Amino acid sequence: MSSTWNLYRTLAAGVIPDANLEATQTMPVPAIPTVQPKPYLSDRGDNMDEIALMFLATTAGVITSSTVDFQVIEQAPNPELAQSDPSARVYIGRTPVGGHATGRIYIFPARYLHAFLVRVTALAAGDELKIFWRPYR
């Protein structure tokens, strides 16, 4: 049984690109939303291995064919500051993805993932981008 798609984030084209928090190790203001998926899927009885993303571009509220450039970034406790500041985080970027067609699924490994966010660097067409996520398996 597949899980429900969750709306992760909606971006106006004018705010793209997102800041490069992987390079700066600083969350931008306003913050990029973070997803903290449950590591255990109660309805399946096993650990979540993968997460699926799907992007939809719209122009004046109508779905538009486009491509998106993005990067999945893991947010994890900072190992150097864990004792002195348990809220300190480190951002670990995965390989950026370029030219991903909207409406097409993107799957990434998620086993032992703390939390993740999606940094968007380009949208080829459209005035708004919606990002959805769900556990894949």
Image (cartoon, rainbow, N blue to C red):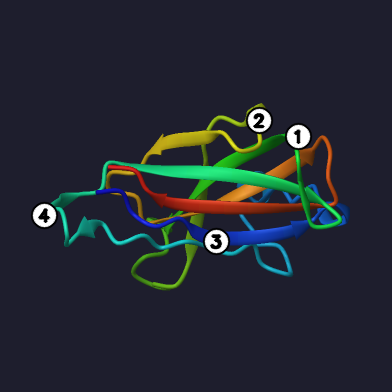
Name the residue that disc number 2 marks: 101
Mark 2 and mark 1 in contact? Answer it, CB < 8 Å. Answer: yes
The Cα atoms of the two marked residues, 3 and 4, are separated by 24 Å
Q: How much space separates mark 1 and mark 4, taking CA atoms? A: 37 Å
Foreground of the two, 68 or 86 = 68
Categorize mark 3 by other alpha carbons within 10 Å: few (<14), some (14-19), many (20+): some
* Residue 95 position within the rendered picture, expressed as x and y whole percent measured from the top left: 55, 30
The crowd level at tag 2 (other Cα within 10 Å; few <14, some 14-19, many 20+) is some
Query: How many numbered marks does the figure carry?
Result: 4
Q: In the picture shown, does residue 68 fall above or below 28?
A: above
Q: Residue at x 41, y 52 (%)?
A: 134
Residue 135 horizontal side relative to residue 8, left or right: left
Residue plotted at (70% across, 35% down): 69
The amino acid pointed to by label 1 is Ser
Q: Is residue 119 above or below residue 26?
A: above
Percent across and percent down for residue 50 are 33, 41
Q: Is the Cβ of the residue at disc 3 closer than 8 Å to that at disc 4? A: no
User: Which numbered disc flags the more N-terminal residue, 1 or 4?
Assistant: 4
3 or 2: tag closer to the N-terminus:
3
Nearest to N terminus: mark 2 or mark 1: 1
The dot on residue 54 is: none
Q: CA distance from mark 2 to mark 1?
A: 6 Å
- The alpha-carbon separation of the residues under discs 4 and 2 comes to 33 Å
The residue where tag 4 is placed is 45
Would you name the residue on which mark 3 appears? Answer: 7
Name the residue that disc number 1 marks: 66
